[in-house]
Image (spheres, helix red, strand yellow):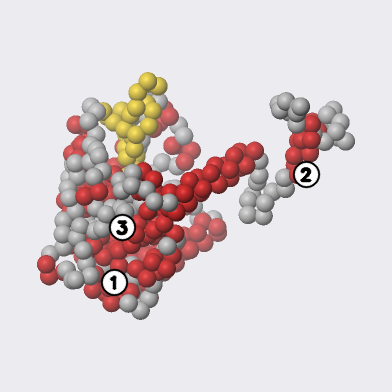
């Protein structure tokens, strides 16, 4: 007969230390001694253990989905294909930047604010927030309801202060960011000087948007960020862009949404109006947005980005619900080649899935040079 599980394990205590002298050590000393902080972590505790265990469970589920046969269209088949493609590093390296070509072609062909808006609308349901963040969460004013939140966005660095602080570490962080973006343009075949200039323009534009953003401290102030607007009134913030129609095209059917920072959207409208198209065209000419350069350079080089998320490479034919945005337009016949496909491959295509994690920020970076005049 075994003992019943004990709610508190005495081995977790350190009875050598009286509770009256150091209660924390008395209550946790045994566990602390048995669980030193792993070298790859800054801290360690019970919640870390839970997280690690969950990661191991998820890993086993992914391996099972990838290693066993499952019927087409089933969740196990889709998850297994996705995981197998994302782990196929030889295929990722062989594909290089080629899976990006159809997307870059579309960005390169953009000539108006309407084009920018259409591309941003198509990407938003894929969790790629080109210009702003849009999501659904519980309504902070009504726990029984959900609410669409439309918020500030468009930044490549984590938040506003990364752009505005002038301490040494922040300056170094921005320099590293520019170097990273420069390297990614170079990975697509850009010459060093052109890549650096493009990266610096990106930082300048993001800095302009950051200056209109709330700080993290302000974003935690519910009284400041809870600002319910009727959808029909959103065009007062961005009349040229047509924010009301943009939100509707994303599938929003509610009468109202929340705007966290109205000032950001007026600043975004101005920024879009004042960013020259020619700057974008020049950047594309020098940074391999031209698909022929992408293809020719990738025959002799491969690249892997460390950008922000496994989230791109999905065409409108993937059947995402809740989006009425326009279908991505095919490149003109003059810009096509036998190695260029449109629409891009579906999410289950290995070359496309494998490139997702390295492509999300490319759309944002490229899009930031498009505007309705210049």
Instruction: Tell which circle, 1 or 2, labels the residue nearer the N-terminal end.
Output: 2
Q: Name the residue located 83 percent from the left edge and 29 percent from the top edge.
A: 19
Helix or strand or loop: what does disc 1 sit on? helix
Give residue 187's position: percent from left, percent from top. Answer: 38, 71
Helix or strand or loop: what does disc 2 sit on? helix
Q: In this view, does 337 lie to the left or right of 353?
A: left
Q: Name the residue located 33 percent from the left edge and 74 percent from the top edge.
A: 298
Circle 3 crowding by C-alpha within 10 Å: few under 14, some 14–19, many from 20: some
Cα separation, mark 3 vs mark 1, equals 20 Å
Determine whether label 3 and label 1 are within 8 Å by CB: no
Give residue 156's position: percent from left, percent from top. Answer: 40, 54
The numbered mark at residue 33 is: 2
The numbered mark at residue 165 is: none
The quadrant in which residue 10 appears is top right
287 shown above or below 83: below
Front label number (3 vs 1): 3
Circle 1 crowding by C-alpha within 10 Å: few under 14, some 14–19, many from 20: many
Cα separation, mark 2 vs mark 3, equals 48 Å
Q: Name the residue located 16 percent from the left edge and 59 percent from the top edge.
A: 330
Front label number (2 vs 3): 3
Question: What residue does disc 3 label?
Answer: 349
Q: Point out the image quarter for the C terminus.
A: bottom left
Q: In this view, does 14 lie to the left or right of 167?
A: right
Determine whether label 2 and label 3 are within 8 Å by CB: no
């Amino acid at each position: 007969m075994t003992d019943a599980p004990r709610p508190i394990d005495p081995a977790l205590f350190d009875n050598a230390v009286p509770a009256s002298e150091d209660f924390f050590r008395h209550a946790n000393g045994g566990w602390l001694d048995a669980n030193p902080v792993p070298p790859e972590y800054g801290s360690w505790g019970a919640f870390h253990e839970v997280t690690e265990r969950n990661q191991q469970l998820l890993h086993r589920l992914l391996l099972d989905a990838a290693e066993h046969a499952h019927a087409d269209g089933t969740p196990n088949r889709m998850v297994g294909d996705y995981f197998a493609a994302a782990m196929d590093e030889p295929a990722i390296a062989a594909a290089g930047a080629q899976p990006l070509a159809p997307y870059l072609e579309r960005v390169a062909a953009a000539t108006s604010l309407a084009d920018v808006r259409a591309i941003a609308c198509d990407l938003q349901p894929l969790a790629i927030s080109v210009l702003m963040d849009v999501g659904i969460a519980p309504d902070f004013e009504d726990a029984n309801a959900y609410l669409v939140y439309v918020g500030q966005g468009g930044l490549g660095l984590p938040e506003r202060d990364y752009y505005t602080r002038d301490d040494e570490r922040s300056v170094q962080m921005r320099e590293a960011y520019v170097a990273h973006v420069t390297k990614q343009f170079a990975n697509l075949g850009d010459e060093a000087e052109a890549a650096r200039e493009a990266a610096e323009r990106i930082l300048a534009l993001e800095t302009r948007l950051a200056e209109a953003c709330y700080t993290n401290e302000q974003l935690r102030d519910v009284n400041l960020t809870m600002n319910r607007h009727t959808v029909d009134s959103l065009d007062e913030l961005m009349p040229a862009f047509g924010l009301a129609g943009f939100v509707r095209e994303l599938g929003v059917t509610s009468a109202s949404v929340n705007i966290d920072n109205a000032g950001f959207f007026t600043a975004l409208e101005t920024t879009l109006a004042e960013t020259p198209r020619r700057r974008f065209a020049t950047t594309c000419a020098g940074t391999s947005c031209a698909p022929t350069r992408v293809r020719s350079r990738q025959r002799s080089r491969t690249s892997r980005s460390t950008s922000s998320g496994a989230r791109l490479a999905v065409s409108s034919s993937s059947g995402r619900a809740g989006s009425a945005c326009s279908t991505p337009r095919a490149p003109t016949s003059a810009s096509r080649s036998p190695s260029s496909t449109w629409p891009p491959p579906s999410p289950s295509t290995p070359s496309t899935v494998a490139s997702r994690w390295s492509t999300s920020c490319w759309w944002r970076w490229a899009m930031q040079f498009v505007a309705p005049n210049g």
